[in-house]
Every structure is written in C-alpha cells, then in structure tokens.
Image: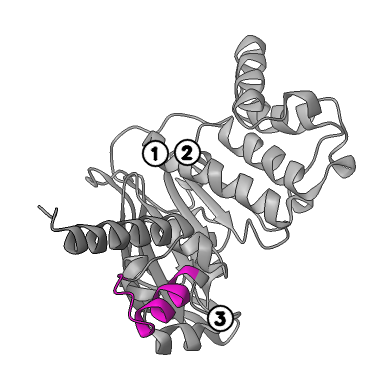
C-alpha cells in the first residue's frame, strides 16, 4: 500500500522543482557510470537527454525513480529526498516508459495491465474503472482494452504502456528511448502525445533518445558523455553544434541541413528545426522579396 508522506526529515523545500541532483555518483562494480553530476529540472519542462550508447543516459533516469541506487550525492524528486524510506512514494510520482513495452506488460489484456498499477495504489474499483476508461480514450486505445498485449503493433504497445503509466497520475514521466522501435507513423503519433503532455502543463517530461526530431521538440536538451553533462541548453542552440553532434554520433536534423543549404544558395533564412519552420521562413522570405520588388514594404 502506498501511504502519504508528511513533511519532515525526508521532505525538502523544492518549490516548482521536479528533479534536483547534487554531486551524484553511480557505480557499477568498480566502474563509475556517473560522476559528480548536478542537475535541476523545473516543474513542467520537457527535457531531452542525448548521448552515445554507454554514456550514462539510461542510468541517469533510472536513478530518478530509485530503480538504481546512487553511491554519492543527493537526489530530490518532487520535493522528496530519495532514500529507501521515500523510494515507494517517489516511484508513484515518477512514471517510466521503456523502449520495449513488452518489458513492462504484466496483464493478459491491456485493461488488466492498466489495472495492475492502479491496484497497487489501492484505489476503489469505481475509480480504477474511471481511470482506465479515461486514459484509454485519451491514448486512443479504448478498442484495444480486451486485446492481449502481444497481439498489438509496436505503436499500439507503446500507447498501451504509456496509458498504464499515465493512469497512475505521476507528476514526472520518463520516456526511455520510446521512439526507437517504432515505424515513422507510430513515432509521429507518440511525439504528438508527448507534445500534448507538455502543453497540458500537468507533467514534467524527460525523454532519452537518439532521435534528433524528438530532441528538436523539447524545451531543453542535455548531452551526457563519459558519465557527466557536457552540454545543457536549448535544442536550437545545441543541435546546430556539429562537433557536439559528432560526439553523440548524431546527424543534424534534415530541416537544419536544408536551411543551411538554402543560405548557401543565397536564400537568407535562419536555422530551422522542423519542416513547418522551413515553410514559414520561405514564405516570409518570399513576402519580403515581393514587398521590396513592388515597393509595398512596411
């Protein structure tokens, strides 16, 4: 049973801060995976974490809900200092969706799977049924509730896994490589859902990814390398740094490459991170040229 924690020794004054990590170290045997890492994530922000394989990205997010222990430092999640005592409550507040949703399915049907987490919260049956219906409708999987998870497509599985997490109404949602196993259509559907989550203001969203399109949509981007944060800024600033992308073994987003190519051809537009930005920039460029040519500028 998850019990309510009252303010006291384990409660911290962290108003509007979702995650605070101070000089955190994590070891795997004799190997140091994360070293002297400090980080603050404000409530309601979408933070994208990038880095090459083995850099420590997944370790970092698993520390945030106590799936892995830290050996040094201090971690505060939603105002609670992470300790063995607070770990159950913190796991209730931090939901996590994995790259392979098969790793987190436990029920014989999608409905059973969503209900499993709610049963652990000891909710009344009526409230459980209401939440299952509400989040199944929100994620577009109401017609899949009686299906076995193994019979779903990759995109359907990811939406079912996310519904199970959101039904528990966490304050922080971590999506670890959520788009890595999806086809283009399913990826766009998941990114659309993540945009809606950010726009709602109800969640702090943390995503781990190698997908530059996903990075471009976040509010903030972190780059992890050799167990530490080597870059922290807006996606617009960081995705334009070729050396940084090479270190992460990433290619710049196609719209950014296109906007650079257009500038080389004399079409002066700024860096664009999405196709819609390219279209808007070209339209503005066209209008400006028309006004100059006709003398109607203003």
Secondary structure beneath label 3? loop
* Cα–Cα span, label 2 and label 1: 5 Å
**Most foreground residue, 298 or 8:** 298
Say if mark 1 contacts mark 3, CB within 8 Å.
no
Secondary structure beneath label 2? helix
- Crowding at dot 2, Cα within 10 Å, few <14 / some 14-19 / many 20+, comes out as few
Left or right of 144 on screen, residue 4:
left
Decide whether residue 9 is among the magenta residues: no
- The part of the chain drawn in magenta is 255-270
Where is residue 157? Give x, y as percent: 76, 44
Where is residue 214? Give x, y as percent: 51, 60
Judged by depth in the image, the label closer to the viewer, 1 or 3, is: 1
Say if mark 2 contacts mark 1, CB within 8 Å.
yes
Residue 52: image tag: 3
The residue that appears at 29% across and 74% down in the rendered structure is 268
Task: Spot the residue most to the left.
Answer: 298
Instruction: Give the residue pinned by disc 2.
Output: 196
- Crowding at dot 3, Cα within 10 Å, few <14 / some 14-19 / many 20+, comes out as some
Instruction: Give the residue pinned by disc 1.
Output: 199
Residue 206 versus residue 136 in the image, above or below: below
The mark total stands at 3
Residue 164 versus residue 206 in the image, above or below: above
Residue 152: image tag: none
First reached walking from the N terminus: tag 2 or tag 3: 3
The residue that appears at 49% across and 37% down in the rendered structure is 170
Judged by depth in the image, the label closer to the viewer, 2 or 3, is: 2
Secondary structure beneath label 1? helix
């Amino acid at each position: 049973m998850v019990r309510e924690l009252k303010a006291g020794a384990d409660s911290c004054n962290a108003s509007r801060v979702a995650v605070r990590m101070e000089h955190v170290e994590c070891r795997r045997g004799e190997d140091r995976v994360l070293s002297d890492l400090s980080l603050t994530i404000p409530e309601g922000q979408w933070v994208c974490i990038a880095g090459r394989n083995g850099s420590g990205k997944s370790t970092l997010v698993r520390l945030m809900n106590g799936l892995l222990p830290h050996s040094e430092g201090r971690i505060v999640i939603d105002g609670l200092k992470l300790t063995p005592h607070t770990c159950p409550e913190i796991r209730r507040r931090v939901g996590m969706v994995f790259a392979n949703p098969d790793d987190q399915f436990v029920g014989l049907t999608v409905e059973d799977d969503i209900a499993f987490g709610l049963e652990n919260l000891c909710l009344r049956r009526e409230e459980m049924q209401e939440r299952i219906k509400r989040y199944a409708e929100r994620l577009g999987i109401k017609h899949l509730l009686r299906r076995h998870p193994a019979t779903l497509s990759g995109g359907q599985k990811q939406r079912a896994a996310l519904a199970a997490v959101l039904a528990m109404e966490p304050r922080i949602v971590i999506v670890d490589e959520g788009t890595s196993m999806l086809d283009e259509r399913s990826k766009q559907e998941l990114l659309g859902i993540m945009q809606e989550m950010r726009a709602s203001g109800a969640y702090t969203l943390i995503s781990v990814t190698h997908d530059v399109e996903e990075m471009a949509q976040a509010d903030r981007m972190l780059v992890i390398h050799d167990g530490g944060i080597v870059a922290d800024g807006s996606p617009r600033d960081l995705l334009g740094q070729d050396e940084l992308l090479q270190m992460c073994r990433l290619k710049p987003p196609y719209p950014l490459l296109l906007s650079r190519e257009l500038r080389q051809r004399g079409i002066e537009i700024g860096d664009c991170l999405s196709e819609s930005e390219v279209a808007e920039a070209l339209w503005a460029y066209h209008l400006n040229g028309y006004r100059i040519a006709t003398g109607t500028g203003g």
